[in-house]
Amino acid sequence: MKIVTVRAPSGHYEVKIGAGLLASLGAEIRACTAAKRCAVISGENVFPLYGEAALDSLRAAGLEAIPLVFPAGEETKCLLRYGELLRFLAENRFTRTDCVVALGGGVTGDLAGFAAATYQRGTGFVQVPTTLLAAVDSSVGGKTAVNLPEGKNQVGAFYQPRLVLCDTDTLTTLPERELRAGYAEVIKYAVLGDRVLFEALETETFELPAVIESCVRQKAEIIREDERDTGVRRLLNLGHTFGHAVESRSGYALLHGEAVAVGMAMICRAAVKKGLLSESDSEAVIALLAAFGLPTGTDDTADMLYDALLLDKKFSGGKLHLIVPRAIGRCEILPVTPPELRDWLEAGLHEQ
Ligand SMILES: NC(=O)c1ccc[n+]([C@@H]2O[C@H](COP(=O)([O-])OP(=O)(O)OC[C@H]3O[C@@H](n4cnc5c(N)ncnc54)[C@H](O)[C@@H]3O)[C@@H](O)[C@H]2O)c1
């Protein structure tokens, strides 16, 4: 088992990563909370696969465990489901010392986390990520949210879990496309700050638990410094600024990770044109994305993406923060004005 300790200003917790960990869920929750009861929140694809194992483990540890299963998909991250979850907790008389367990991907984690953050002003919360994206990204760091019809993640809270338990065996049932999309986030961490990881991915000499550990370790370091996304945490948006525009332009036909892959390829191409990144590093990033079966281009024009970006993004002080790779393993935050952003988009679209 690999363990990473997250030392966020609002709370410390461990991320445990390894095969077969679901069996110890109950004992782990007993060890880090005073909960007597657990609400196991899951999705319709995940619960039939891992729900019984989770409930069995909790009950074997002397905890009462009550499940609530939602439809799969991004639509579940909404106010209606959030309200249902709160009512479920209230009807079952959960208290602040009890625990909400999110068993699933980022959708389940974000929804359950936001309910945990707000039910009785905050109840115990444990993440059990079952997608690669959730394992390396969304389960760690305390961002929780639901969507509004007006936009994604518009209502949420920073709320750290008490524990993240990542059983890597659960990732074996993940659909191939979801797994590949998760690797886009892994490649993001490699480009951001881990050349060793980048080379391991290139040469296919890696094991998944170690890869997840590397990503989580990097995220933990960033969160220790900037929990609330006002400084270095912005680095985690590498590929996301352009990626969000590509994602919304696709009408969400692209998975988040796929759109991030396009966004990373675009920012690399643009950084080369601006003289900030070597052509060889850019080519290596784009080749790695392609090797993992991820898209690296779009048919959208700069104007289309610019319009989508203006709708989606807030310019603070008239500037938006672009994350620009300077070399594999080193990126920087570059504030840009709207006209500069338009120029970066244009530069990212076309081959050298
Ligand atoms: N909080 C954060 O910091 C953060 C960061 C990144 C993304 N997110 C959010 O995460 C969400 C995306 O998360 P995701 O990519 O995990 O998608 P997801 O939760 O929708 O899961 C993807 C699909 O895989 C299925 N699935 C999950 N685990 C499975 C398993 N082990 N076996 C078989 N099927 C399984 C799900 O039912 C779903 O159909 C988005 O809403 C995004 O906004 C949050």
Image (cartoon, rainbow, N blue to C red):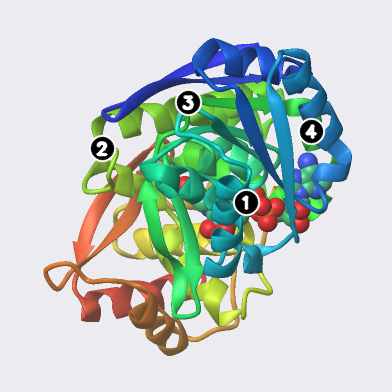
How many angstroms separate mark 4 from mark 2 (CA)? Answer: 30 Å
Q: Which residue is mark 3?
A: 162
| Kind of residue at badge 4 | Thr
Q: Say whether marks 4 and 1 touch (CB < 8 Å).
A: no
User: At which x and y percent is residue 332?
Assistant: 27, 47
| Horizontal side of residue 81 vs 151, given as left or right | right
Q: Nearer the viewer, mark 2 or mark 1?
A: 1
Instruction: Please say if 262 is above or below 224.
Output: below
Q: Which residue is mark 1?
A: 88
In front here: 51 or 333?
A: 51
How many angstroms separate mark 2 from mark 1 (CA)? Answer: 33 Å
Question: Which SS class for mark 3?
Answer: loop
Q: Nearer the viewer, mark 4 or mark 3?
A: 3
- Label 4 CB less than 8 angstroms from ligand 1: yes
Task: State whether residue 287 appears in this view.
Answer: no
| Horizontal side of residue 227 vs 215, given as left or right | left
Q: Nearer the viewer, mark 3 or mark 2?
A: 3
Q: Say whether marks 2 and 1 touch (CB < 8 Å).
A: no
Q: Which residue is mark 4?
A: 170
| Kind of residue at badge 2 | Asp
Q: Earlier in the sequence, mark 3 or mark 1?
A: 1
| Horizontal side of residue 254 vs 265, given as left or right | right
User: At which x and y percent is residue 241?
Assistant: 40, 64
How many angstroms separate mark 3 from mark 2 (CA)? Answer: 18 Å
Q: Say whether marks 3 and 2 touch (CB < 8 Å).
A: no
Task: State whether residue 136 appears in this view.
Answer: yes
